[in-house]
């Protein structure tokens, strides 16, 4: 006969859910993980091109966005990247470091999934999947247990952990389940939006750059306090590449409540004094676009000059005009028309309001025994392994207390 009563039920068998379950099981708690998906931790499997960018050596609170910016500090301090790397090494998983401290598996993201599954099994964690949760209710009894009704059975628990993720990548099963549970128990939700997502451009701008699809260049992008220097990619719909994905989260955050989209500022010559460089070449007979092509892709340089009407030799620019050119190169403002949505977003911005949660236990302050971990919360990491680290940190934090 199936066991229906548990100490802890975790809804969501992803990174944060399995981390939490493994920790709780290690403490001797009777734990059940429920997930509606047929495949375990599909988001881990497809991450990092199949190699899983599982953390970053440079993790800090400054790598996360939230309306409660200090919330992540406690969990990250108690279980940071060093602790997760130690776990990876204990399981014999070989890994390598790429730019900016990013760590990837040498072989396959499946190794991280297998590691988490093994950790859960060591803690006696049971899995019920694929199994969809129909409803959750709080029982008014002495134990104040939660009743979790599925399409097959009704389970009860003292601690309920919501690790159901956000809305990104719906094709692998993303749902708003976690937000509905939060609202059911009176916990506010910061309106979700796609994050780490390509930006789309207005038709008139796209028309001028149609021939540049596939062009890549290293630039600096900034918006609403976020500043990043990495590669940008021009696509047939707008802008992508690491630097655009990074700044997209800040652009989305800035757009809350605004009737008009805010601009994103691009420095096309990061690390260079554009005005001094142009002044060195003032008076030359070559086209401005040809000079820019020394530091930017040639096709892009010519299209950018055409966009601004600067298709003239350098010696035909007055000093005041070169100052305008230099300013545009250092701070080229583009107003995106939107994003490519959750289908192309790596994570979700917004979520369960962390101001209603304990930063030590991830428990809802107004509902004892109800915890939230991972992407379902209003904590969004930068690109580069930070969102997985938040899954490990928040899952570990909750696992110590459920």
Image (cartoon, grey):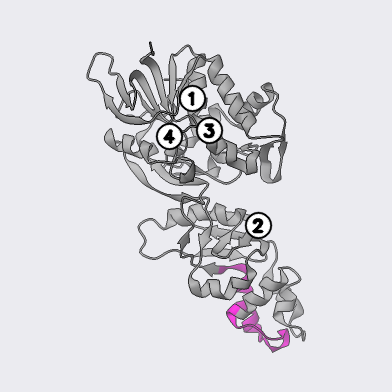
Is residue 385 visible in this depiction of the protein?
Answer: no
Dots 3, 4 in contact, CB < 8 A: no
The residue that appears at 37% across and 36% down in the rendered structure is 178
Dots 2, 4 in contact, CB < 8 A: no
User: What residue would you read off at disc 1?
Assistant: 20
The residue that appears at 76% across and 79% down in the rendered structure is 281
Dots 2, 1 in contact, CB < 8 A: no
- Label 2: few (<14), some or many (≥20) within 10 Å? some
Q: Which residues are magenta?
A: 307-332
Of pointers 3 and 2, the one earlier in the residue sequence: 3
User: What residue would you read off at disc 2?
Assistant: 231
Q: Position of residue 79 (x, y in %)?
A: 56, 27
For the stretch drawn in magenta, the main secondary structure is helix
User: What residue would you read off at disc 4?
Assistant: 164
Between 162 and 281, the one nearer to me in the picture: 162
Of pointers 2 and 4, the one earlier in the residue sequence: 4
Vertically, is 13 above or below 260? Answer: above
**Is residue 311 found inside the magenta-colored segment of the image?**
yes
Q: Nearer the viewer, mark 4 or mark 1?
A: 4
The residues bearing labels 1 and 3 have C-alpha atoms spaced at a distance of 14 Å
Q: Position of residue 96 (x, y in %)?
A: 72, 37
Dots 1, 3 in contact, CB < 8 A: no
Of pointers 3 and 4, the one earlier in the residue sequence: 3
Q: Position of residue 54 (x, y in %)?
A: 61, 36
Between 85 and 163, the one nearer to me in the picture: 163
Q: Nearer the viewer, mark 3 or mark 2?
A: 3
- Label 1: few (<14), some or many (≥20) within 10 Å? many
Dots 4, 1 in contact, CB < 8 A: no
What's the mark number on residue 41? 3
């Amino acid at each position: 006969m199936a066991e229906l009563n548990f100490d802890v039920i975790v809804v969501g068998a992803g990174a944060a859910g399995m981390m939490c379950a493994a920790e709780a099981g290690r403490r001797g708690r009777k734990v059940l993980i429920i997930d509606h998906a047929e495949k375990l931790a599909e988001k881990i499997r497809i991450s990092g091109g199949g190699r899983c960018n599982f953390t970053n050596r440079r993790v800090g609170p400054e790598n996360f966005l939230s309306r409660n910016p200090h919330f992540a500090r406690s969990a990250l301090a108690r279980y940071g990247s060093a602790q997760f790397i130690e776990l990876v090494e204990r399981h014999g998983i070989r890994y390598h470091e790429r730019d900016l401290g990013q760590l990837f598996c040498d072989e396959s993201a499946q190794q991280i999934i297998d590691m988490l599954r093994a950790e859960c099994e060591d803690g006696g964690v049971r899995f019920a999947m694929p199994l969809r949760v129909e409803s959750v209710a709080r029982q008014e009894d002495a134990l104040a247990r939660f009743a979790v009704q599925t399409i097959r059975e009704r389970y009860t628990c003292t601690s309920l952990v919501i690790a159901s993720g956000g809305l990104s990548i719906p094709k692998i099963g993303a749902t708003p389940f976690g937000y509905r549970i939060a609202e059911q128990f009176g916990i506010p939700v910061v309106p979700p939006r796609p994050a780490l997502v390509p930006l789309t451009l207005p038709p008139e701008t796209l028309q001028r750059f149609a021939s540049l699809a596939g062009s890549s260049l290293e630039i600096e992008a900034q918006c609403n306090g976020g500043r990043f220097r990495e590669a940008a990619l021009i696509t047939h719909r707008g802008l992508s590449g690491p630097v655009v994905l990074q700044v997209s989260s800040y652009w989305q955050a800035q757009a809350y409540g605004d009737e008009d989209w805010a601009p994103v500022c691009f420095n096309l010559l990061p690390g260079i004094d554009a005005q001094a460089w142009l002044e060195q070449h003032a008076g030359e007979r070559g086209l401005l676009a040809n000079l820019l092509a020394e530091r930017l892709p040639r096709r892009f340089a010519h299209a950018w000059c055409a966009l601004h009407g600067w298709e003239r030799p350098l010696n035909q620019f007055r000093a005041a005009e070169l100052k305008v050119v230099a300013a545009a190169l250092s701070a080229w403002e583009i107003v995106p028309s939107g994003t490519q949505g959750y289908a192309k977003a790596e994570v979700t911005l917004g979520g369960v309001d962390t101001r209603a949660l304990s930063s030590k236990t991830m428990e809802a302050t107004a509902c004892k025994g109800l915890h939230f971990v991972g992407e379902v919360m209003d904590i969004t990491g930068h690109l580069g392994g930070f969102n997985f680290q938040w899954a490990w940190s928040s899952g570990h934090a909750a696992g110590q207390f459920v």
